[in-house]
Image (cartoon, rainbow, N blue to C red):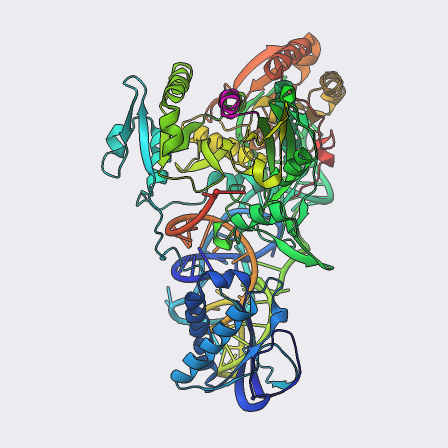
Amino acid sequence: MRLLLIHADYLEFKATEKTKIAEDTNKLEGRMEECLTVFTAVERGDEVNPEVIVEKALSEITKIAKNLKVDNIVVYPYAHLSSDLASPEVAREILVEMEERLREMGYNVLRAPFGWYKSFKISCKGHPLSELSRRITCDTGGKEEKDEKKSKLYLLDVEGERLIELKEGNVQEVVKDEDLKALACKELGIKDKEERGEPAHVKYIREKEICDYEPSSDHGHFRWYPKGKLIRDLLADYVYNLVVEYGGMPVETPVMYNLENRAIREHADKFGERQYRFIQGDRELMLRFAACFGQFMMKRDMYILPRYLPLKLYELSTYSFRYEQRGELVGLKRLRAFTMPDMHTVCLDMEQAMEEFEHQFWMCLKTGEDLNIPYSVIFRFTEDFFQENREWFFKLAKRYRERYKRDVLIELLPERKHYWVGKVDMAVIDSLGRPIENPTVQIDIESAKRFGIKVHQGDREVYPVILHCSPTGSIERVICALLERAYRDLERGKLPMLPLWLSPVQVRVIPVSEAHKEYALEVVKRLRESNIRVDLDDRDGSVGKKIRNAGRDWIPYVVVVGDREVEENTLTVTLREKSTMKSSYRERMSVEELIKRIKEETEGHPYRPLTLPMYCSLQPTFK
RNA sequence: GCCUUGGUGGCUCAGCCUGGUAGAGCGUCUGCUUGGUAAGCAGAAGGUCGCGGGUUCAAAUCCCGCCCAAGGCUCCA
């Protein structure tokens, strides 16, 4: 519900003409002096719980009325405040209810008729509180009763092929793995009493000039600086290469969809309030919250044969939009616009789907290794699916344990409430011990039918099973995880840094004095020609200060060149990886050796050139 | 969205309780210094104290509303 409240000297209206939805009434004109006029639009979302809406609206209105010291209230239906209206019946009921309740509370109430064209005059008082707007939603802060059956959480005892149910009482002793324990506590809703500060990455994204909030956009939309843009693009390249090698076919689909399409409307409605919707011309549109829509529509139009399967389409959804609640937005962890690698795989049947699920499970885990961000794993299955495929699952879990030496959690849902019957989520634990949910694979048994995706098997048409997979989770969350892990390193006495292949500047060359600049420039050129991101600190200042600055920028290799190096034609290289806060680790080596070293270390990872001027003196400050 | 905390030069923060000429460090600029592994020296510039209203002779400071961020709640299909 949206309210526009105006403290007026007077309001008067006169109904002029009926609309199709006009209510029967003889109160066709009215006037009230010294009143609070409440222009009201009842919205679609309000139908979920009209009682709560009325309650909350009345509490707002009376609070304001008390503040303004008015006893006269006009309830005025005003559809134009919203583009997402409730049905006329519900809207009228709510307005009548508001009128009656206000009257019971002792206010003088005038209600303008619903569904009529009306002329009106209003005289707004114009003081600071004379014009206010409010938005009311059904959200009661989680107090409403959910009569859904609760799911149960287990730790998988691989040896005994046994599930150990986890409860608030036993989780501390049963789960040995600290990261997994953090995930289990989150799942069980156990809160630790400790006061938590701001997550480390929120500070880092600005300090390292990666990205920042864009105040001129909506909340949770970011601007990306050259260093951050580079990291994003490299991560995008990384997933692209990974997925294409795996057999995914890259596509690109629109970011917005027309809600007149039945399948899209159904899929979108399931997502509830958390989406961007708007009206443009005569169409109701929505912004995608994942790449499902475009890929499903593409698949619907394909003539799919069994031999194409499993058929994988991949897209980097730049962007996915989710209208998260205001207070839920946190740095790069929760956004309203984010970039998600999204792959959908058409599988002939459940057997093929499970086989693919396994492959994609391993692929997701590999990204954790490549990025050096270890994942904690939780499977989620419906009870039925789990019982039918118990053996398969235990085999998979056993192999995971052999490889990663870690346990897994499993959640069993008494009945299917989403489009999937099984999924796996992988989370990185941040510097404060909170999970960042990243990669996922889901087995979808609902969407093929809804979107009309068919496989032509002989003379039969069958609805396939579809897997959803994001091999890394959103790019923003990957960056979040990398920064959070960097902070954890710092807490454990290591210097924080990004993996070499993702470091915006890989090498910084520092000449000791003006006289060594030429030699330094030569070194920079050699490195550049070898596709290494290198810059030259040609600013004024001591060597000590430049070293410090390079450290602040988390530069993995810092090269100092002075008389000694020029004479011997070598470099003195400080390796961040092996240095600590107290002592820096240095090695003498030739340019060739440095190049070889970096090439070996970045092998198999994407490369993009430096996104900043080569001279530090020319690099602008963004923050 | 709700509750809590915060918003002061580009950055980090003090001042606010108890109203009376807006401070420090870093960064920037200028000059000196030409250097060897985490801040060389000196000087200068730089602020609508988040925004709007109110109280007051006087507001960064007190009051109200709003905006923005973080923490918590809820949520993450």
Q: Position of residue A450 (x, y in %)?
A: 58, 41
For the residue pair A188 and A517, the one nearer the viewer reads as A188
Q: Position of residue A617 (x, y in %)?
A: 72, 34
Q: Position of residue A147 (x, y in %)?
A: 34, 51
Inspect this view and state whether residue A322 appears. Answer: no
Quadrant assignment, res A599: top right
Q: What residue is rendered at 67% in x and 18% in y?
A: A562
The main secondary structure of the magenta stretch is helix
Quadrant assignment, res A107: bottom left
Left or right of residue A492: residue A251: right
Location of the C terminus of chain A (image quadrant):
top right
For the residue pair A185 and A383, the one nearer the viewer reads as A383
Residue A60 vertical placement versus A579 (above, below): below
Residue A295 vertical placement versus A31 (above, below): above
Residue A89 vertical placement versus A611 (above, below): below
Residue A140 vertical placement versus A6 (above, below): above
How many numbered marks, from 0 up? 0
Residue furthest to the front in view is A459
For the residue pair A83 and B9, the one nearer the viewer reads as A83
Q: Which residues are magenta?
A: A348-360
Inspect this view and state whether residue A500 appears. Answer: yes
Left or right of residue A109: residue A256: right
Left or right of residue A203: residue A526: right
Is residue A618 one of those drawn in magenta?
no
Q: What residue is rendered at 55% in x and 45% in y?
A: A335
Q: What residue is rendered at 45% in x and 61% in y?
A: A138
Quadrant assignment, res A348: top right
Q: Position of residue A257 (x, y in %)?
A: 67, 47
